[in-house]
Image: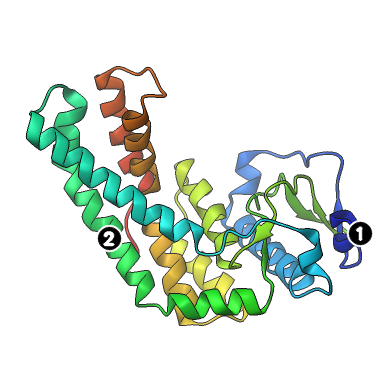
C-alpha cells in the first residue's frame, strides 16, 4: 500500500522538509493571490480521483463545516435568550444584545443561500471525484517550482475543493487585508471548471461571520480569561474583520 508521500509523488507533488520563506506583503498582493489560486487548482487536479485513494485513510470533512455553522447559530441564539432573560450584566452583554441578532440574521442568510445553491449536488460531486483538500493553502505551505511542494499535510482530508479557497480567503480576511473577493472567487471557479452552484456556495461561506461566532464561543466556554470589556472589543474587531457580505 502506498504511503501518502508515495501517493503524492506519483502525481508530481512533493512533501518539503522546510517551510517556504516569504513575507505577508509578498503573499497577499493581488497578483500573488491569483497565482496562488492557480497552484491550488493545479494541486486539486493532480491529487483527486486517484487509484487507491481511500487506502490513505484520510479524514472526511465533507459537510462538516456547514453543520458546525448551524450549531453555532443555535448556540448564539441561546446566549442572547439567556441575556434577555437574566438582564444585561456587563459590556459584553450590552454589545451582544445590540449586534448578536444582526449576526444571526447574516449567518442564517448565508446558510439558506448555500442550501439554495444545490448543496447536496456539490457533496455528491466531491464524493464521486474523491476530492481532497489541503486546508492550509497559503504560499508558506503550498508553492510551485519544478514541482508542487507542500510543507504540512497534517490537515489533508476528503472535502469539497471549494473549501481550500474558502479557508484561504478567510485567512486573508482575518488579517484585515482588503481584496476583491468576488474576483478571486470567480477566478477559482473558472480555473477549476466549476459552476454557479460552487460560486454561490463559496460566496456564502466567505460571508459567514466566523470571527464573531468564534468570540461568542470563547465567551460561552470561558477558556479565555478576558474581562467583559476585552470580550466586547474582540466582538467589535471580529465584526470589522468579517467584513461585508457577498450574499
Residue 32 horizontal/vertical position (percent):
64, 56
- Of mark 2 and mark 1, the one earlier in the sequence is 1
Residue 59 horizontal/vertical position (percent):
66, 56
User: Which quadrant of the figure contains the C terminus?
Assistant: bottom left
Q: Which residue is mark 2?
A: 108
Q: Marks 2 and 1, how far apart in space? A: 43 Å
Residue 23, quarter of the rendered image: top right
Can residue 147 be seen in the rendering of this structure? no
Given residues 222 and 98, the one toward you in this image is 222
Residue 75 horizontal/vertical position (percent):
29, 44
Checking the image for residue 25, the label placed there is: none
**Picture residue at 35% right of the left edge, 56% below the top:** 70
Q: Which residue is mark 1?
A: 6
**Picture residue at 75% right of the left edge, 75% below the top:** 49
**Picture residue at 19% right of the left edge, 36% below the top:** 96
Asked if residue 58 is positioned above or below residue 118 in the image, the reply reads above
Residue 245 horizontal/vertical position (percent):
32, 59
Asked if residue 228 is positioned above or below residue 124 in the image, the reply reads above
Is 223 left or right of 16, judged from the image as shown?
left
Given residues 167 and 191, the one toward you in this image is 167
Asked if disc 2 and disc 1 are in contact, CB closer than 8 Å, the reply is no
Can residue 27 be seen in the rendering of this structure? yes
> What colouring style does the render use?
rainbow
Is 150 left or right of 40, judged from the image as shown?
right
Is 210 left or right of 236, judged from the image as shown?
right
Estimate how packed mark 1 is, as few (under 14), some (14 to 19) or many (20 or more) residues with alpha carbons within 10 Å. Answer: few
Residue 79, quarter of the rendered image: top left
Is 187 left or right of 76, judged from the image as shown?
right
Amino acid at each position: 500500500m502506498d504511503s501518502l508521500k508515495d501517493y503524492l509523488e506519483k502525481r508530481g507533488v512533493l512533501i518539503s522538509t522546510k517551510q517556504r520563506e516569504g513575507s505577508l506583503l509578498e503573499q497577499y498582493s493581488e497578483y500573488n493571490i491569483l497565482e496562488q489560486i492557480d497552484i491550488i487548482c493545479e494541486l486539486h487536479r493532480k491529487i483527486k480521483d486517484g487509484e487507491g485513494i481511500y487506502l490513505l485513510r484520510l479524514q472526511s470533512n465533507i459537510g462538516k463545516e456547514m453543520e458546525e455553522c448551524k450549531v453555532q447559530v443555535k448556540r448564539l441564539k441561546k446566549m442572547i435568550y439567556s441575556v434577555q432573560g437574566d438582564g444585561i450584566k456587563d459590556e459584553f452583554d450590552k454589545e451582544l444584545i445590540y449586534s448578536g441578532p444582526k449576526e444571526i440574521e447574516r449567518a442564517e442568510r448565508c446558510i439558506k443561500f448555500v442550501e439554495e445553491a444545490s448543496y447536496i449536488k456539490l457533496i455528491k460531486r466531491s464524493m464521486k471525484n474523491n476530492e481532497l483538500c489541503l486546508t492550509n493553502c497559503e504560499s508558506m505551505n503550498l508553492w510551485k517550482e519544478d514541482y508542487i511542494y507542500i510543507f504540512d499535510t497534517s490537515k489533508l482530508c476528503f472535502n469539497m475543493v471549494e473549501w481550500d479557497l474558502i479557508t484561504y480567503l478567510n485567512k486573508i480576511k482575518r488579517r484585515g487585508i482588503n481584496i476583491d473577493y468576488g474576483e478571486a472567487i470567480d477566478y477559482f471557479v473558472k480555473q477549476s471548471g466549476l459552476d454557479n452552484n460552487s460560486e454561490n456556495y463559496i460566496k456564502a461561506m466567505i460571508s459567514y461571520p466566523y470571527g464573531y461566532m468564534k468570540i461568542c464561543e470563547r465567551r460561552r466556554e470561558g477558556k479565555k480569561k478576558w474581562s467583559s470589556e476585552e470580550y466586547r472589543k474582540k466582538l467589535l474587531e471580529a465584526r470589522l474583520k468579517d467584513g461585508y457580505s457577498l450574499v
